[in-house]
Amino acid sequence: MDGQPDQTRRPASVWLEPALALLVLGLVIGTMLGLPTPPHAWVLNLSVCVGAALSGRFPRVAAAISAGALLALLSVPGQYLGPAALSFAINVFAAVRLQLTYWPWILGVVGSAAFVTQGLHSSRSTEELIASSTVLVVLAALAVGAGILWHKAEALIQLERERAERQLLDL
């Protein structure tokens, strides 16, 4: 495999990453509504979620959008940041689910951008930094594990379909 997703086997899960990103966007909106958030912070948070939403179709571009928007969020005061950085896990999940050979790079780049933004920039104390870091590491591990399990489940479903087709042909 050359690191690109197999276009002929693409499952009907093209809406998975956009749906997950929409959930994160709802969380962002819900947590930022009452704050005097600068307008460019809204745009950047939306950009992070758009990057996550595109990760199932255009993983490299999506990772670049997410990482760039996360790093641009460093221009926003830490107390006005929403939870958009958590959507880095969607980029990682998609890359692992699609069995891209470069998924560790996506994890490293987008995960580091999320850590710098959500961990270092927005934490006001050592305890907050430890808590943020722990959440990001756990999310990364869950994203990798879920991506592996999703791919294995798709492979098992495909095997079952092929077996059923062979049984029909034998009748």
Image: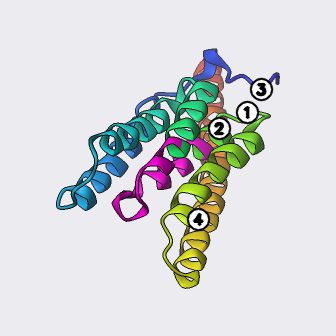
Residue farthest to the left, as pictured: 34
Asked if the residue at tag 4 contacts the one at tag 1, i.e. Cβ–Cβ closer than 8 Å, the answer is no
Q: Mark 1 falls on what kind of element? A: loop
What residue is disc 1 on?
Answer: 100
Q: Amino acid at mark 1?
A: Leu
Magenta highlight on residue 4: no
Looking at the rendering, the stretch of residues picked out in magenta corresponds to 72-92
Q: Mark 4 falls on what kind of element?
A: helix
Residue 104, position as x, y percentages in the image: 76, 45
Q: Is residue 88 magenta?
A: yes
Q: Position of residue 79 (x, y in %)?
A: 37, 65
Visible in this render: residue 161?
no
Residue positioned most to the bottom: 127
Residue under circle 4? 120
Which circle's residue, 3 or 2, is located before the other in the chain?
3
- Residue that label 2 marks: 95
Q: Which residue is mark 3?
A: 3
Identity, as a three-letter code, of the amino acid under mark 3: Gly
> Residue 60 occupies which quadrant of the picture?
top right
Q: Are marks 4 and 3 in contact (CB under 8 Å)?
A: no
The reply to whether callout 3 and callout 1 are in contact (CB within 8 Å) is: yes
